[in-house]
Amino acid sequence: MHTHNKLLKLKQVYLMPIALGLLASCSLQIENHGKRVDTQALDNIIPGITKKEQVRASLGPPSTKNDFGSLSWIYMGSDLKKTVFFGDQLISRLVVKITFDSKNVVTNISRVSEKDKRDIEHIDKETSTAGQEIGVLQQLLGNIGRFNNSTPQ
């Protein structure tokens, strides 16, 4: 009887931290990626009036810039829910594109949300590079005999 109680106590001592660790790993975690856009500040940007410097002052630097064709700044931000068993799940995404004219004045503001997204098919092809393809065995044994033991004079 005494051994049974001892085993039960040992199980409690070792299994409780494991169970608590597993339970804690199931907790909800939200990660923010990219540049969060303040929608109130975005509403204050008026096409035809607001200049590029004012956009930078109110929204900060963009996630990316497009310098080809019409100059535009793109702000991208998303929220992901992370769980252990179900992976990452997108909660929300907002992409804002602000276009400027040659005088650095805002001409257009367009918003793209998760509802407006388009699925892009990825191609599994690889671009080959010039050079020699070497295998694992060549990598392991390739330097044998290549070292020179003579010291420079």
Image (tube, rainbow, N blue to C red):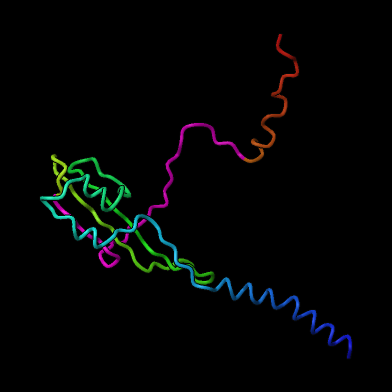
Quadrant where the image shows the N terminus? bottom right
Q: Where residue 31 sits: x, y (%)? A: 44, 63
Residue extending furthest right? 2
The region drawn magenta spans: 107-135
**Nearer to the camera, 115 or 36:** 36
Counting the numbered discs, the total is 0
**Nearer to the camera, 145 or 96:** 96
Q: Where 115 sits versus 59, above or below? A: below
Residue extending furthest top? 153
**Nearer to the camera, 121 or 58:** 58
Position of residue 151 in the picture relative to residue 74 (left or right): right
* Residue 134 lies in the magenta-colored region: yes
Q: Residue at x 41, y 61 (%)?
A: 32
Q: Quadrant of residue 52?
A: top left
Position of residue 11 in the picture relative to residue 25 (left or right): right
Q: Residue at x 14, y 55 (%)?
A: 46
Position of residue 105 in the picture relative to residue 95 (left or right): left
* Residue 86 lies in the magenta-colored region: no
SS assignment for the magenta stretch, majority: loop
Quadrant where the image shows the C terminus? top right
Q: Where residue 65 sits: x, y (%)? A: 28, 45
Q: Where residue 102 sits: x, y (%)? A: 14, 39
Position of residue 75 in the picture relative to residue 105 (left or right): right
Q: Where 45 sits versus 69, above or below? A: below
Q: Residue at x 72, y 25 (%)?
A: 145
Q: Where 115 sits versus 142, above or below? A: below
